[in-house]
Image (tube, coloured by chain):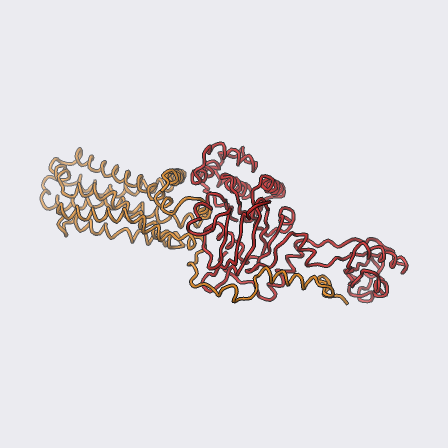
Chain colours: A orange, B red
Amino acid sequence: MNVSRVGAVIRKELAEFRRNRLIVTTAALVPVLFMVSPTASILSIKAQALGTTLDKRVEASLFLPLLIPVLVPAIMSAYSVVGEREQGTLEPVLTTPVSRAELLIGKAAAIFVPAAALAYLVFGVFVAITQFAAIPAVAAAVRHAPQLPAVLVFIPLLAAWAIWVGLAVSTRVTDTRVAQQLSTLGSLPPVALAALMSFQVISPTFGLVAALAGGLAVIDCTACLVVARLFDRERLITGARPSGGLPAPASARGPSVIVSASARLARRAAPGRPRGFRRSP
Amino acid sequence: MSGDPAVEVSHLTKVFGGRTAVSDVSFSVARGEVFGFLGPNGAGKTTTVRILGTLISPTAGSATVAGIPAGPDGAPEIRQRISVMPESPGLYQRLTVTENLDYFARLYGLPRRRARITEALAAVGLADRAQDLTGRLSKGLRQRVALARSLLNDPAVMFLDEPTSGLDPVATHEVHGLIAGLRDRGVTVFLTTHRLEEAERLCDRVAIMSTSLRTIGRPDDLRQQLFSASLDVTVAVALPEPGRVFGGLPAVQGWKAAGPAAAGPAAAGPAAAGPAGYVLTVSDVRQAAPAVTRALVAAGADVLSIAQSRHTLEDVYLELVGDAENTGNTEGGPR
């Protein structure tokens, strides 16, 4: 693993993101929009509505932040490989010494760092607003909610999951739109699990959360190897699977082509058959 | 051109599904040689280059590039020592020219990146466009940026796929000069092109592909092998009996009328009154030309010109590839 090559990929990816205002705007706007509803929900709780209503609203509000590290990275990573293929930049890159793992880790890191940072930032702003603007009982409920540390742990794990799913899809499909749809779908299962815990369908005990987080962390760390195996240069360049069985050996097919061609040339140049004079009277 | 070959290909075959893209191809390219790789669309040229560039694996056969056997073990080292310029420039359009080159310089792990980028851009005449976004460049300029990118790692073997595609004549001339300069520096250039005059002008040897290798050799040798020597004769008025004039002359093996005279004086009508041309197959031009001149003068013909026929590489190409296509010998496959 050559770290400087990974760094080169990260640097290039980030430069491309920066130059694409639509990507930057969308990536920033989606998390903000996702936090508007829970923030408004928390701030609108009246003192007389405490109890069960408070608990339900806090649960719902702390679930939505988990979607932020999933949706944006899933779409961006889905574009990552198939997009390069569509714009013709993948082939020149694959003729350089960069390895599959270096390329994939670089692409993953370039999406992971801003996505996780943005998710933490937006979530931090949400928590800060609830602490300063909500009534004290609501602020305390948010601060002491068992889901709060789980959200902090799961943000990077879910982001990594979504990125690897997106990259895996992106290495196997030939259309960006299909890649983005499949990637979004593929990134949802762990979110569903987190939702079950947020809404206390599954009791989020410390042990369960730790086990799930540990499992997801292991999957995230080994996903690079799996995706690297899916990353087939030949398939990406030609769109075709590598051929199956070998054809018959050359000896079974007669003389080599060079010999055949030479013999043909010799025949053509032979006296009595000048090639430029086939229509001679 | 000396020592071990820069590229050696032995019985290379590539099958995609049920389609054969490259069939039992063998050739070698000497170090420092400019090697032209010609053929119609779907002939297997790009597939061969992709195999040599370690992008895809052959179904059968073997190849050595820059002295390293192509295969999973040798691929990283080969990639370090070659550069491939695909037909499409493949540039990041939101990045500047310098940023594009810097990315590749980093992937190659090059020292003195800034200096190398400057040198590469100067070599293709783009020093003053270094900070332009590539998306705003014309197609020709993008092609030049791609060429600069392929120069960055000072490769032992350069694979250029249609390097002058989309370039205007001036830019084409500059690229030709650049390729000639690379040869002078000892760089092996593997040039895939449809432009036969380009191959004729630049290449030491050419190979003509049509799934299998149709022929390989120096353009002059191929012409000599494929076409007999001939003389182009033009006279002021069509000869009434050309067979009597040309028949029996020393070193003349055959003749045919060219232009309006080919249809015969009667069929040509009014055109028969104008200049008429004849093409004579000869075994020895030096012996035949004076004899033909004397015979024409003796027959009372007004000779306008007598010249040795010049067959181009295009003639060779059409002769070989045209036959292959007529016999349905060209098989398709992924480009």
Residue B202 vertical placement versus B227 (above, below):
above
Residue lying farthest to the front in this orientation: B3
Question: In the figure, residue A31 lies in which quadrant?
Answer: top left
Residue closer to the observer: A29 or B237: B237
Q: Is residue A104 left or right of residue B39?
A: left
Residue located 28% across and 40% down the image: A116
Question: In the figure, residue B77 lies in which quadrant?
Answer: top left
Residue B266 vertical placement versus B122 (above, below):
below
Residue located 29% across and 53% down the image: A186
Residue closer to the observer: B139 or B301: B301
Q: Position of residue B330 (x, y in %)?
A: 56, 62
Q: Position of residue B139 (x, y in %)?
A: 54, 44
Q: Is residue B321 left or right of residue A188?
A: right
Q: Is residue A1 left or right of residue B18?
A: left
Q: Position of residue A204 (x, y in %)?
A: 14, 48
Residue located 18% across and 46% down the image: A60
**Which of the image's four quarters has the N terminus of chain B?**
top right
Total residue callouts: 0
Q: Position of residue A15 (x, y in %)?
A: 40, 38
